[in-house]
Image (cartoon, rainbow, N blue to C red):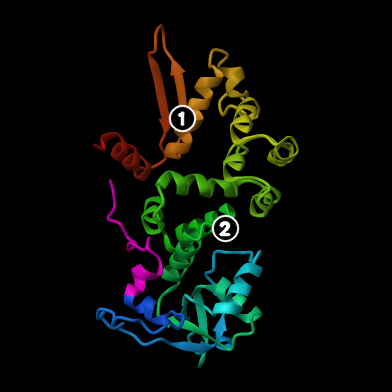
Amino acid sequence: MSQPPKPRGLGRGLSALLGDDEVAAAVVPPVPAAPAVAPSPRPAPTRAPLTLPIGQLRAGRMQPRTSFEDMEPLIESVKEFGLLQPILVRPIAGQIDAYEIVAGERRWRAAQKAQLHEVPVVVRTMGDQDALQLGLIENLQRADLTAIDEAQGYRRLADEFQQTQEDIAKTVGKSRPHVANTVRLLELPGAVQDMIRRGDLSAGQARALIGVPDPLVMAHRAVDEKLSARELERLGVALKPNTKGGRSRTAASPSKSADTVALEKRIEEALGLKADLKLRGLGEQSLLTLEIRDFDQLDTVVARLTRR
């Protein structure tokens, strides 16, 4: 049932693709003071530093980031020290002396603001899939990519390159439930997605709004009343329609406690699957039902249950 993994392990970002020596060679280091004792010899980098005129670089078509904000600290740093990490680029087919940015567009923009004429680069020829993967990895490692941009990047990998959620998880170094739950944010209305981009809503708060009758109203209520993700989950349970009877879970199952509903939600977030937990008879006997769409999801559940 399972398929062999398609992507390469790119979880370490630039170093995984280029090698540590080549990344180090393209970095512009500060000029050190003369050492009192001669340092021990180190292997020479495999590639000499390369710089390109800043005007030869173009913004990346596969860039997952949609906004570039709060750049003043970076601009000031670039003015003082220059770029201390290279920009990864690929040649643009059919154009001479033109390169598309794969990773480092934020640094390129800061270098423009700092009025640099040249920047350190690493040039590689690669396809769109690798370009999108590396752009995602770099931004995720910096921990400042919005959840919506992250979700759209995952969806592009699935739609344009036929990658499964398991493939994507291995590529970016995240769990499959994380990928599944992040992509689900794209089910929310555009106005709610904009609130996530701006930081008005956290990803956890937003996930609690999926499936409620009017998520935008609830989103504004969450902001105005400063509701936590857990509080939104409890409100959402009462508002979400039941797929069978058109009633909420609470109305359809009066005996289901808030703790049981909260536990269902935790299972759903951990596995990325719809869960139904019912108490049966006396004592602690329970029945857990998971909705599994395909064999990939089944493989994931089996792997988690049989892990030692």
Label 1 crowd bin: few (<14), some (14–19), many (20+), radius 10 Å: some
Judging depth in this view, the residue of 38 and 291 nearest the camera is 38
Between 132 and 112, the residue placed more toward the observer is: 112
Q: Give the labeled residue for mark 2.
A: 149
Mark 2 crowd level (few <14, some 14–19, many ≥20, 10 Å Cα): many
| Whole-percent x, y for residue 224 in the image | 75, 38
- Which of disc 1 and disc 2 is earlier in sequence? 2
Amino acid type at image mark 1:
Ala
User: Could you tell me what secondary structure mostly forms the magenta stretch?
Assistant: loop
**Badge 2 vs badge 1, beta-carbon distance below 8 Å:** no
Residue 57 is situated, as x and y percent measured from the top left of the image, at 55, 83
Q: Secondary structure at mark 1?
A: strand
Residue 45 colored magenta? no
Q: CA distance from mark 2 to mark 1?
A: 27 Å
The spot of residue 240 in percent (x, y) is: 62, 30
Residue kind at label 2, given as amino acid type: Asp
At x 35%, y 81%, the residue is 35
Label ID, residue 33: none
Please give the name of the residue rendered at 58% of the width and 55% of the height, measured from the top-left corner.
146
Residue 41 image-quadrant placement: bottom left
Identify the magenta region. Answer: 1-20
Quarter assignment of residue 235: top right
Q: Mark 2 falls on what kind of element?
A: helix
Question: Which residue is disc 1 drawn over?
Answer: 275
